[in-house]
Image (tube, coloured by chain):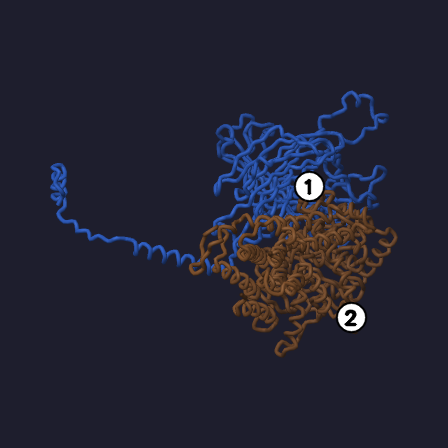
Amino acid sequence: TVSIVHVLSYLAGIAWFLALAFPPLTQRTYMSENAMGSTMVEEQFAGGDRARALARDFAAHRRKSGALPVAWLERTMRSVGLEVYTQSFSRKLPFPDETHERYMVSGTNVYGILRAPRAASTESLVLTVPCGSDSTNSQAVGLLLALAAHFRGQIYWAKDIIFLVTEHDLLGTEAWLEAYHDVNVTGMQSSPLQGRAGAIQAAVALELSSDMVTSLDVAVEGLNGQLPNLDLLNLFQTFCQKGGLLCTLQGKLQPQDWTSLDGPLQGLQMLLLMVLRQASGRPHGSHGLFLRYRVEALTLRGINSFRQYKYDLVAVGKALEGMFRKLNHLLERLHQSFFLYLLPALSRFVSIGLYMPAAGFLLLVLGLKISSLHEAGVGLEPGGSPGPSVPLPPAQGVGLASLVAPLLISQAMGLALYVLPVLGQHVAAQHFPVAEAEAVVLTLLAIYAAGLALPHNTHRVVSTQAPDRGWMVLKLVALIYLALQLGCIVLTNFSLGFLLAATMVPTAALAKPHGSRTLYAVLLVLTSPAATLFGSLFLWRELQEAPLSLAEGWQLFLAALAQGVLEHHTYGALLFPLLSLGLYPCWLLFWNVLFWK
Amino acid sequence: MAAAMPLALFVLLLPGPGGWCLAEPQRDSLREELVITPLPSGDVAATFQFRTRWDSELQREGDTDHYFLRYAVLPREVVCTENLTPWKKLLPCSSKAGLSVLLKADRLFHTSYHSQAVHIRPVCRNARCTSISWELRQTLSVVFDAFITGQGKKDWSLFRMFSRTLTEPCPLASESRVYVDITNYNQDNETLEVNPAPTTTYQDVILGTRKTYAVYDLLDTAMIHNSRNLNIQLKWKRPPENEFPPGPFLHAQRYVSGYGLQKGELSTLLYNTHPYRAFPVLLLDTVPWYLRLYVHTLTITSKGKDNKPSYIHYQPAQDRLQPHLLEMLIQLPANSVTKVSIQFERALLKWTEYTPDPNHGFYVSPSVLSALVPSMVAAKPVDWEESPLFNSLFPVSDGSNYFVRLYTEPLLVNLPTPDFSMPYNVICLTCTVVAVCYGSFYNLLTRTFHIEEPRTGGLAKRLANFIRRIRGVPPL
């Protein structure tokens, strides 16, 4: 029952997506915000030596105390003339985080406010340096302090500038942001902030790990796939060009030649990387957490590789100074440019109007399938809207009642998948020789796999008087459910929606309890959400030119599962609940259709 | 260091026979003053005050009618050069002589804090207040920043601050003085050296702390004629170890909490840092109507407990007519932080009501706090062994409180804003065109047309019809 239209529509979707990297669909980026476009600023930052000295001091104090040297930071910030405050926070993670090696986290954030002489503290900008346990980021702290000292001596500031150093990287940032906005989203315990500086307009996070950098990498993807306004990226790019800095996106150099096939192919690679990163819904840098509060933000990472030409901290400082001076000119919040875009290169973008058709074509398959099932006379109400040509004697038997059991059971499986792993970690850890984090992941996989036993449970419950019509009604409901979910996801996070649609749509359209069931079953398992995640990890490492072996991939997959659950609990990432409560039950319905008896 | 305050202009009409109507004031008199307060951090605060009085033939009739008192704030306005120039023109000597020579815009705006005010009020000329004078008081406060203006040095002089020195008094001035705060921060010896040495000193309790001032009188001819000009220099002999003098007992902070464009919360934190004394504070909030306050969410907590205000006056807003007015008398417990919070919903404005640059946000005016704050002098532990015995009989002196009025920071709140860009305009325009076309087409298509005969025959016909109607015959 799969017609040529379905196949064509699916292929058109995929082809459209692949074509996004090619020139007519990608456009050059341009600055839309007037306040930042035409005005020139002259960068005068020259505190490279000071930054290095401060970085050395910071690193020494950090080594001595083993944690963030709060007192030293306070003293130094005060000595450069900032108004300094600290904030302590603590958070017990739902289970031990093995990649970052932390469980009971408590730390202190230090921030200094430069009060603008020309304004009444109604607006502010943030420069933040996340200090983690694994990345000390001391050069970034040095540069932050040196920049603060330089900025303090200027009188042109119209917005307050907050210099924020957070401990435990993103956890500290989240604690600070929640306290600044006086909300509690994730159950973080923190002391209230003593000093504030109005509405934050933009933020830049800085990560540097060496005195010299060969290139600056910029990360835009934030929590739940949110992106900053494109103008902020344009601003960064402007100063990259002005300062002659080498700037990269996704750790890759910009393709130069867009006229031949090479450029667009490289662009496609970067586009895919961006799609994978955005689809993961995790904050790729501490800027990602700012986006929830409608603060435009991005992360700059200094990369030190084996390239010959290197830049010192002055060059990076100048780029930052320029960016802050231009942000200082802003009259309104950044709103002129795009909020929804894809980037095949740093200087090229695809706007929402151009990438949406790709997802539209994929969803069209579901739409066509739904309408064809509907035309075949499958309705939920007995006798409601029957097709004129098809006689429907047994329609009475297929009411809502037969659907209740599979729907309820699959939804309950989803709920169990969402709740049980974290809830039952201690029980699992007691009875099996595993650590809590492993217990969570293994429970997750066990429940996921247990869902596959579902049809054997339901076919006893469901009284199947009309075998053929029964599965068609179930499939109709499942298709509508899937189409609605994918439609919503595509609107908020295109990348995630597209990835899921590209994998789930063909098998969802094909699922039926006839023909070679084993083949269908294998296909369905291969396109289940977990398998998509597994495959995405391989694709991701392949695109980064660091291919994975199967064993490594499996380890990475387990780690990614644990991270996904953790990020949901600590930052409020929505991927885990979305998959467990929405897409997994939906997928189980198709599995149920396949094994309908 | 606070940032520049928004321009606040107060015109206060004070009631007539009050405590301040003493003897007959001098006619057309000018008094000018400059108070320089060096701060231990290296910053210097300078406050100018000019008071002009002139007679008026305007007669006052009884008390001021409080019904006509108004309070207005422009939170968006920031003080700048264009506020200074007309302000200077109100001075009798303009900026030609006297203290006003120092008012050079490029130096004054090179500071980290700037506040400028004009107060005008009537003053009674006799006890029965039959005739009045007008008093115009102009004040200007700036804080010079050791980091920006001082290039990191803590020593100051008039020339370094204002790039001018004082040469002559204003001929119209009846009093022209410079006060320099030379209060000792350390107990043992003096920490601040002023040059030239002052002729006199003056001591008083200002804002609850005992202060000593060096006084320079410009009308004293010896003062300027010795060296042709007066350039007061301040030198820290020994910078105080404690860089941060104790903060005031009452301070406040205000912010918007929450995120998203639907709801939010206005929170005001009131700090009472006095170790053992509680005092009441009158909090006045005006909130624009487009923030729809939920009054039932008003919570006041101190030290984790509910703090019930002893007086609440609430006047709800009317859309497009008047803002919310919320006035409360709150008791601040000793050594506590009191949080006053109220939730609001952001209204969707009509599209013509958005200001230019709507994505900048909308300002909410500062809260006003009025309080009688216990003085620092009274709070200091008295050394009972050293002081006379009668001190313990009357432990609290009369000057134990001082009045203070504080303004919190203004707030910037984003409202849900439509996209005022080209696509939005196109949508608006097309919708309008469609609506207009649809309306008129629908009207044309559904209306039935009747041909009405032209009215002929004026009065006679009407009369005839009237008669016919009475008779029950159809009219002509």
User: Which mark, by number, is residue A348?
Assistant: none
Crowding around mark 2 (Cα neighbors within 10 Å: few <14, some 14 to 19, many 20+) is some
Specify the farthest residue to the front: A465
Q: Nearer the viewer, mark 1 or mark 2?
A: 2
Residue A563 located left or right of residue B284: right
Vertical order, B36 against B131 (above or below): below
Q: Quadrant of residue B39?
A: top right
Type of the residue with mark 1: Arg
Query: How many marks do you count on the picture?
Result: 2
**Which chain is disc 1 placed on?**
B
Q: Which residue is mark 2?
A: A310
Marks 1 and 2, how far apart at CA: 61 Å
- Residue at the disc numbered 1: B177
Q: Position of residue A67 (x, y in %)?
A: 83, 51
Quarter of the view holding residue A340? bottom right
- Crowding at dot 1, Cα within 10 Å, few <14 / some 14-19 / many 20+, comes out as some
Q: Chain of mark 2?
A: A
Which colour represents chain B?
blue
- Residue A322 in sight here: yes
**Local SS, label 1:** strand
* B435, above or below B142, in the image: below
- Front one among B143 and A170: A170
Residue farthest toward the right in the current orientation of the protein: A64
Q: Position of residue A117 (x, y in %)?
A: 67, 51
Of A40 and A355, nearer the camera is A355
Going by the numbered disc 2, the residue's amino acid type is Lys
Q: Quadrant of the C terminus of chain A?
A: bottom right
- The residue that appears at 71% across and 29% down in the rendered structure is B278
Out of B27 and A27, give the one closest to the viewer.
A27
